[in-house]
Image (cartoon, helix red, strand yellow):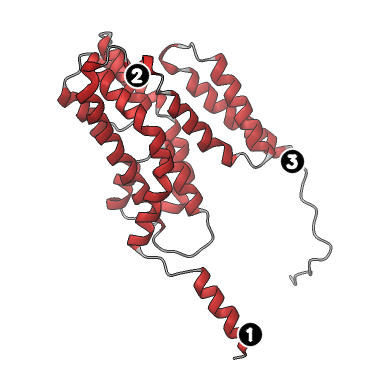
């Protein structure tokens, strides 16, 4: 082996350290920290809002621990305070969370080899923030067999923060007359924008985002968040249409011909 070959091999090994379960787990947690910052005020506001809306402390903590869906929890608390029937609450929160089906379809090729003991918790802990973090990790070409541990690290970090900050909001909520007047929920809007922008890399994605954004604005006043269904469908359809309109990639004339 020549000296130059040895150097190249050493450089490759140093650039691709062996992945470990613990290393992937903590890497996923660290990658999620910036998004946790945006979720902290959102969770605190939920705890405070639930306390002022009359939901019991046990019920508030149980909702964060067993529902773990910020937008659905806010809607659920408001509907409960208004005396809405259980059927309407279930239907509304179901519609709001339909976007998770799209996340699941995207993640399925990377998770299909995992046993059920992994799939159930990862499915329960799936959030917008965790999806944005882990899909980037899954798509990296390195051969790490522990990428699902990265996923777990992100999910556990988000879940722990949400439950803990709900408790904080619950404890201080009765001292806050109108939690929403603080305007802290804007932090979550900024977080979602930050999640979306890095994925806008091609014209079809830009078209999908533009159509979905316009639809979301126009259907914002629809009852029970039914506009979300139309928005998701229109966004997907627009992206597929834009993809079909892309010109075909011309073959590289310098590429060698392959034998049949």
In the displayed structure, would residue 189 be above or below residue 102? above
Circle 1/circle 3 CB separation < 8 Å: no
Q: Residue shown at 49%/18% (left/top)?
A: 227
Residue 104 showing in the rendered view: no
Give the SS element for disc 2.
Answer: helix
Q: Residue furthest right?
A: 253
**Residue 225 shows up from this direction:** yes
Q: Nearer the viewer, residue 166 or 101?
A: 166
* Residue that label 2 marks: 75
- Viewer-side residue, 104 vs 157: 157
Which part of the image, by quadrant, shows the N terminus? bottom right
In space, the residues marked 1 and 3 are separated at their CA atoms by 44 Å
Q: Residues within 10 Å of mark 2 (few under 14, many from 20)?
A: some
| Alpha carbons under labels 3 and 2: distance apart | 40 Å
Q: Which image quarter: residue 66?
A: top left
Q: Is tag 3's residue or tag 2's residue first in the polypeptide sequence?
A: 2
Residue 202: x %, y % from top left:
67, 41
Q: Could you tell me residue 109's position as x and y percent?
A: 47, 51
Q: In the image, residue 219 lies at what x, y percent?
A: 53, 15
Q: Earlier in the sequence, mark 1 or mark 3?
A: 1
Residue indicated by mark 3: 246
Left or right position of 220 against 156: right
Say whether marks 3 and 2 touch (CB < 8 Å).
no
Residue underneath mark 1: 4
- Residue nearest the viewer, comparing 61 with 173: 173
**Real-space Cα distance between discs 1 and 2?**
63 Å
Whether label 1 touches label 2, CB < 8 Å = no
| Foreground label between 1 and 3 | 1
Residue at image point 45% right, 31% down: 99
Nearer to us of marks 3 and 2 is 2
- Classify mark 1: residues with Cα within 10 Å, few (<14), some (14-19) or many (20+): few
């Amino acid at each position: 082996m020549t000296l130059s070959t040895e150097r190249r091999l050493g450089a490759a090994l140093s650039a691709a350290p062996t992945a470990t379960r613990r290393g992937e787990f903590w890497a996923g947690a660290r990658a999620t920290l910036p998004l946790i910052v945006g979720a902290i005020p959102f969770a605190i506001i939920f705890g405070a809002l639930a306390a002022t809306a009359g939901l019991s402390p046990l019920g508030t903590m149980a909702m964060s621990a067993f529902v773990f869906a910020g937008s659905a929890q806010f809607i659920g608390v408001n509907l409960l305070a208004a005396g809405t029937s259980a059927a309407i609450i279930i239907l509304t929160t179901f519609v709001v969370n339909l976007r998770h089906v799209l996340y699941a379809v995207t993640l399925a090729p990377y998770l299909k080899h995992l046993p059920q003991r992994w799939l159930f918790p990862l499915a329960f802990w799936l959030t917008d923030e965790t999806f944005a973090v882990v899909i980037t990790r899954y798509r990296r070409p390195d051969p790490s067999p522990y990428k699902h541990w990265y996923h777990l690290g992100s999910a556990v970090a988000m879940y722990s923060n949400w439950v803990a900050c709900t408790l904080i909001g619950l404890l201080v909520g009765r001292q806050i007359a109108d939690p929403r007047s603080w305007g802290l929920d804007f932090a979550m809007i900024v977080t979602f924008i930050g999640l979306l922008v890095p994925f806008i890399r091609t014209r079809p994605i830009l078209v999908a985002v533009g159509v979905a954004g316009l639809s979301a604005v126009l259907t914002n006043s629809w009852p029970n968040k039914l506009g979300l269904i139309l928005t998701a469908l229109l966004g997907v359809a627009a992206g597929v249409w834009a993809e079909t309109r892309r010109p075909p990639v011309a073959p590289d004339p310098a590429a060698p011909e392959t034998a049949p």
